[in-house]
Amino acid sequence: MEVRRFRRNKLVGVVIAFGFAWISCQHDPQREPFLHEDYIQSAYFSGGTTTVFDASPSAFTKPLNNLSPENLQRFLQGEAIFNGDFNNVVNSPFYGLGPQFIESSCVNCHVGNGRGALSSISHQGLLLRISMQGTDGFGAPLEVPFFGTQLQTNSINNSPAEGALDVLWEYQPVVFPDGYSVVLKQPYFSISNPYHPLPEFYLRGGRHAAPIFGLGLLEAVPIATLESIADEPDQNEDGISGKLNYVMDFQVNELRPGLFGWKSSSPGILQQTADAFHQDMGITSPIFPLENCNNQSNCQGVQEGIDIEGDLLSDVVFYLRTLAPPARRNLEDPLVQLGGQLFEELKCDKCHIPELQTGIHPIAELSFQTIRPYTDMLLHELGPGLGDGRPDYLAGANEWRTPPLWGIGLTKTVFPNAGFLHDGRAETVEEAILWHEGEAIFSKQSYLELSSSQREALLRFLESL
Ligand code: HEC
Ligand code: HEC
């Protein structure tokens, strides 16, 4: 009897131990992250303690949740300039527009601080980068004579604009194995009515205004972290490389890692902002003190002096650095959880890396935050369908920086006409996925093979970001 009981207890013990192992396996945050309660709690906070809980149309316009009252004042000063409508009326607080420009305010392109319109329905937030074949000694694209590196489609003082941006669309149906189909639209850009003859051959690429919240946190991620993720020779042989761009920093006249722009062509928020004022609005600043006129006969009405002084420029930069990312939503939804698993299985997370840590930053609120931006901030080759034939420093014709996916589910809440991808060609995130090729070919192929309910789950997950 004694022996038998011992044996039975032993068996029960084994069953219990196995059961514990099974349960703990279910709750192991490493193995089943999308079901783990602590994971769910922390995953709501896309920007650590800076996160704002706002899913309204103004979700992208909020200051960091932990911003101090003094810093909030500066945020508001910068916001007023970002939203200001610039003009060429002397003594106006927003004086300085033109002579050549595209839009009169930042927010007209970055609608609701998000992106521009679907480019097949409107050109809001869309611009054309142009250049000649070849590079300067630092790898920068070469100017098109009499035009520069960006087409300005507007001007002041009745002088002619550089030209108009035209787009032709080619339709490409994609049929899934289960019969479901989607039509992709490929844009071809050209310039009509140029004020001066254009060279026979020049490179061109459409660029679409990108969301501008959370950029301070991304800038606060140590470059060493990005270098450690980069795998240009693909040493781990997962088919995915990822590299940093190195671009001219005009503050110090040295090449620095590129962080912003769809091809990582800008080293930081300051230069990106000064460049936007200069190229998109014709507003000079201490970083770009000369009007954007390349020996242009149409540059009339050029005023002496700098249009936006350094302190006001840095207020706008401060505003951009302290715009918060929005919290996630619906993490308890089982479809969202399944979608999260598929996001890993399809290797989306190899480029759209869920989690990064910020380092120390002069704006204390940005320091040492665990953020969930879904990007590696690196360039990847995504195939000729997305390529624009226009390299930018080390970014090849078909290479793009992985865009952050945080907040992407709120895109249409903020701006119902918004488009996705670098030139705003994609109407839905599903279209955006179907454009992935090159290093992301596995992800795209696997997406095509999903069942309709799995597709729904993945899209529901993206909707929750
Ligand atoms: C004509 C439309 C337009 C205007 C006006 C405009 N932008 Fe942009 N913005 C863009 C486009 C297009 C991009 C992407 C550029 C690229 O990929 O190189 C962009 C990118 C950015 C980025 C980088 C986002 C990222 O994640 O890479 C920032 C920051 C930015 N703009 C700030 C501003 C500020 C500040 C202003 C006003 C001074 C402004 N923009 C005015 C169209 C515009
Ligand atoms: C090899 C790296 C890589 C992989 C893998 C990858 N992506 Fe991307 N993703 C990118 C890059 C780079 C872009 C920008 C392409 C462009 O704009 O031309 C992008 C763009 C996107 C966009 C549009 C973002 C925007 O701001 O417009 C979405 C949505 C997206 N990816 C989702 C996914 C999903 C879902 C998967 C997995 C099925 C995936 N990606 C796999 C690199 C990758």
Image: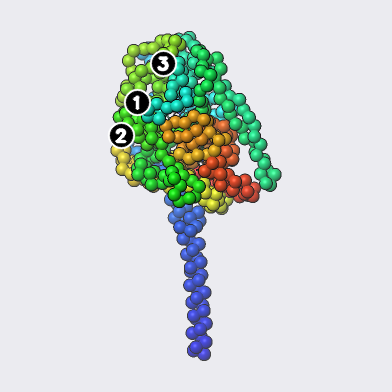
Secondary structure of the residue carrying numbered label 3: loop
* 398 is higher (above) or lower (below) than 310: below
* Some atom of ligand 1 lies within 8 Å of the CB belonging to the residue at label 3: no
Q: Is residue 465 left or right of residue 255?
A: right
C-alpha span from label 1 to label 3: 21 Å
Residue 272 occupies quadrant: top left
The image position of residue 125, as x and y in percent, is: 50, 27
**Mark 3 surroundings: few (<14), some (14-19) or many (≥20) residues within 10 A:** some
Which quadrant of the figure shows ligand 1?
top left
The image position of residue 273, as x and y in percent, is: 39, 28
Of callouts 2 and 1, the N-terminal one? 2
Kindly indicate whether the residue at mark 3 contacts the one at mark 1 (C-beta within 8 angstroms): no
Q: Amino acid at mark 3?
A: Cys
Q: Amino acid at mark 1?
A: Leu
Closest to the observer, 436 or 52: 436
Tag of residue 293: 3
Of discs 2 and 1, which sits in the foreground?
A: 1
Of callouts 2 and 3, the N-terminal one? 2
Secondary structure of the residue carrying numbered label 1: helix
Residue lying furthest bottom in this view? 1
Query: Which residue is found at the position 47% from the left and 19% from the top?
Result: 152
Q: Is residue 5 visible?
A: yes
Query: Which residue is found at the position 45% from the left and 57% from the top?
Result: 30
Tag of residue 70: 2
Secondary structure of the residue carrying numbered label 2: helix
Count of numbered circles in the view: 3
**Mark 1 surroundings: few (<14), some (14-19) or many (≥20) residues within 10 A:** many
Q: Is residue 426 left or right of residue 357?
A: right
Residue named by callout 1: 313
Of callouts 1 and 3, the N-terminal one? 3
